[in-house]
Image (cartoon, grey):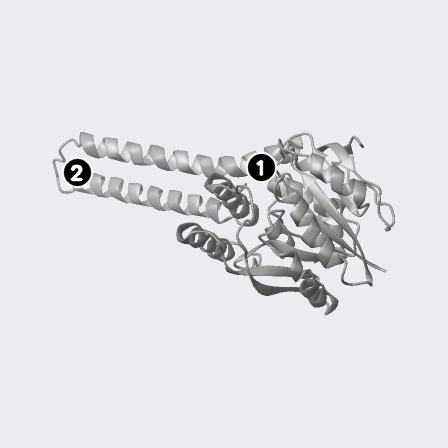
């Protein structure tokens, strides 16, 4: 029998987690030819999220929950859930119910048609006009600068086939950008449009700072364009500097020009040079920092507690090497 894994990352979602489970369970009660598991990854919530998950897991053995020993970030939390999935396909959605679980049957229909990745395209966003414009601008930019085919206006609401899940399990990326990673894998992918709902309760866990951080991860993980821009601008500035120097020497030696000393010009050029150096060193630092994180294995999720970790009608799965668990 076909098994579905539903992946739900959560962080301080005590107001939403039970409603999220209820709506997912109601949808999964429909198709009788599917088995299911619901995987919650609790990113070290400081509220009652894990306590509520304990109550849910005690009543429904299909619910598996992993609580991390610290907050490892949204993308690492999601990647852990993908590696833990035991289904023939996995469906990721957010705990705040902005991605409606009621669309799961539509995603399964597209999967049964042979598509190995089914992703939601946000037709309408509940954000304000400024944030919505920034989101769409980022999607456009990353698609333009990346050699990978990254779908525009597609978020984290997606279905992935078992073959894709097996490839994710091989990755040890510590600064993952999951939507880019999955898009770059290829396979047969299809999108469907939907209207993203507003958050049902609680506060957003993605303020502007987190959005900017995610945007930087996406650009650095999937494009060398920032490095090439740094190289190109450096060459242009070097060429302009050489031409100015050449003009100065020609005027001085051939035409006897008596150039007045330009203290202000010198200071401006020095400041411009320092600014360019600082900017390009920052770009290099972003890439070098990610290499450092990979070699030091930073951000590897450590599981503090689990619920129903082994409870599933599917065959047992061997935990990835970065899953260090203390079972409860």
Q: Is residue 188 above or below residue 215?
A: below
Using the numbered discs, state the Cα–Cα distance from disc 1 to disc 2 in whole angstroms. Answer: 49 Å
Which mark, residue 319? none
Q: Is residue 18 left or right of residue 227?
A: right
- Say what secondary structure mark 2 lies in: helix
Is 4 in front, or is 12?
12
- Dot 1: few (<14), some (14–19), or many (≥20) neighbours within 10 Å? some
Q: Residue at x 19, y 29 (%)?
A: 263
- Say what secondary structure mark 1 lies in: helix
Q: Is residue 314 above or below residue 271?
A: below
Please identify the quarter of the rendering in which residue 292 is found: top right
Q: Nearer the viewer, mark 1 or mark 2?
A: 1
Q: Quadrant of the N terminus?
A: bottom right
Q: Residue at x 71, y 47 (%)?
A: 82
Q: Which residue is mark 1?
A: 290
Q: Does residue 42 show up? A: yes
Q: Which residue is mark 2?
A: 252
Is 169 in front, or is 81?
81
Q: Earlier in the sequence, mark 1 or mark 2?
A: 2
Q: Is residue 172 left or right of residue 313?
A: left
Q: Is residue 37 above or below residue 120?
A: above
Is 324 in front, or is 314?
314
Please identify the quarter of the rendering in which residue 111 is found: bottom right
């Amino acid at each position: 029998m076909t098994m579905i894994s539903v992946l739900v990352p959560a962080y301080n979602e005590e107001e939403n987690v039970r409603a999220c489970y209820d709506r997912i369970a109601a949808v999964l009660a429909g198709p009788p030819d599917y088995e299911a598991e619901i995987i919650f990854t609790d990113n070290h919530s400081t509220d009652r999220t894990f306590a509520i998950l304990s109550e849910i897991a005690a009543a429904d053995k299909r619910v598996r929950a992993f609580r991390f020993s610290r907050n490892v970030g949204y993308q690492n939390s999601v990647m852990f859930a993908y590696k833990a999935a035991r289904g023939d396909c996995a469906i990721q959605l957010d705990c705040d119910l902005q991605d409606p679980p009621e669309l799961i049957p539509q995603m399964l229909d597209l999967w049964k048609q042979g598509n190995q990745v089914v992703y939601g395209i946000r037709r309408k966003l509940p954000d304000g006009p400024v944030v919505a414009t920034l989101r769409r601008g980022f999607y456009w930019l990353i698609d333009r600068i990346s050699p990978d085919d990254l779908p525009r206006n597609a978020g984290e609401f997606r279905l992935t086939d078992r073959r894709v899940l097996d490839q994710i399990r091989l990755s040890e990326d510590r600064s993952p950008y999951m939507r880019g990673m999955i898009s770059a894998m290829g396979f047969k992918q299809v999108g469907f449009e939907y209207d993203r709902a507003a958050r049902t309760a609680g506060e957003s866990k993605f303020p502007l700072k987190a959005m900017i951080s995610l945007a930087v991860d996406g650009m650095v993980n999937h494009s060398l364009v920032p490095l090439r821009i740094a190289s190109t601008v450096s060459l242009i500035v070097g060429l302009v500097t050489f031409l100015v120097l050449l003009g100065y020497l020609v005027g001085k030696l051939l035409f006897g020009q008596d150039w007045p000393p330009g203290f202000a010009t010198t200071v401006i050029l020095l400041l411009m040079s320092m600014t360019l150096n600082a900017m390009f060193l920052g770009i290099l630092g972003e890439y070098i920092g990610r290499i450092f994180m990979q070699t030091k294995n930073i951000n590897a999720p450590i599981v503090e507690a689990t619920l129903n970790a082994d409870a599933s009608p599917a065959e047992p799965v061997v935990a990835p090497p970065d899953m260090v668990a203390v079972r409860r």
